[in-house]
Amino acid sequence: MGTRVPALLTALALVSLPACSSKAESPPSSSPSPTQSSKAIEGGPDCKLPSKKPMPAWVPDDVPLPPGTYFYRALPDKKGLNRGRFVLRIDTTEFGEFVKTRWVQEGISLGRQDSEPGEVEALFRTSSGFGIFKANDVICDPPYATLLLISGK
């Protein structure tokens, strides 16, 4: 493990920074009138699922992903850690349960899982390496979640 653990923790801190915005939010508007939609998003360009790309070779074979999960964006490696984004066809609550049951059954050790509504993340260790995951729900119709997976050896 050596010097990679601090790098992994630094990567986790960088992943978490966008959530700590100092930008003030405007107060919520009045409740929708009968002519307004109460859905957060009803489709449109932001709700289009990202395009599927071939699964990268660095994804650990001993880390199972839920059925329907696919890779969609490579991110630059940082400090020897592989990084990429995936689409989950389940929400973050279901993914958190999948991790707690299936990953543990597969012998994957989990660090303290952190979750908030619409988000789940944790450090993990497998027989072949270690990593971090962070999943976020996407408010669309149909709903899905995105997964950031960071992995090292």
Image: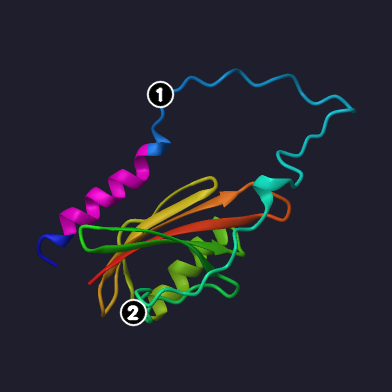
Q: Which is more toward the observer, 31 or 10?
A: 10
Q: In the rendered structure, which segment of residues is drawn in magenta?
A: 5-17
Q: Amino acid at mark 2?
A: Gly
Q: Is residue 58 above or below residue 87?
A: below
Q: Earlier in the sequence, mark 1 or mark 2?
A: 1
Q: Position of residue 20 (x, y in %)?
A: 39, 33
Name the residue beneath numbered marker 1: 22
Q: Amino acid at mark 1?
A: Ser
Q: Position of residue 79 (x, y in %)?
A: 20, 58
Per the model, the C-alpha gap separating discs 1 and 2 is 40 Å
Name the residue beneath numbered marker 2: 107
Task: Answer few, some or many: residues within 10 Å of disc 2's Cα (few below 14, many 20 plus, some between 14 and 19).
Answer: few
State yes or no: residue 6 in magenta. Answer: yes
User: Circle 1 — which element?
Assistant: loop
Q: Is residue 130 above or below residue 64?
A: above
Quadrant holding the C terminus: bottom left
- Which is closer to the viewer, label 1 or label 2? 1
Q: Position of residue 71 (x, y in %)?
A: 50, 67
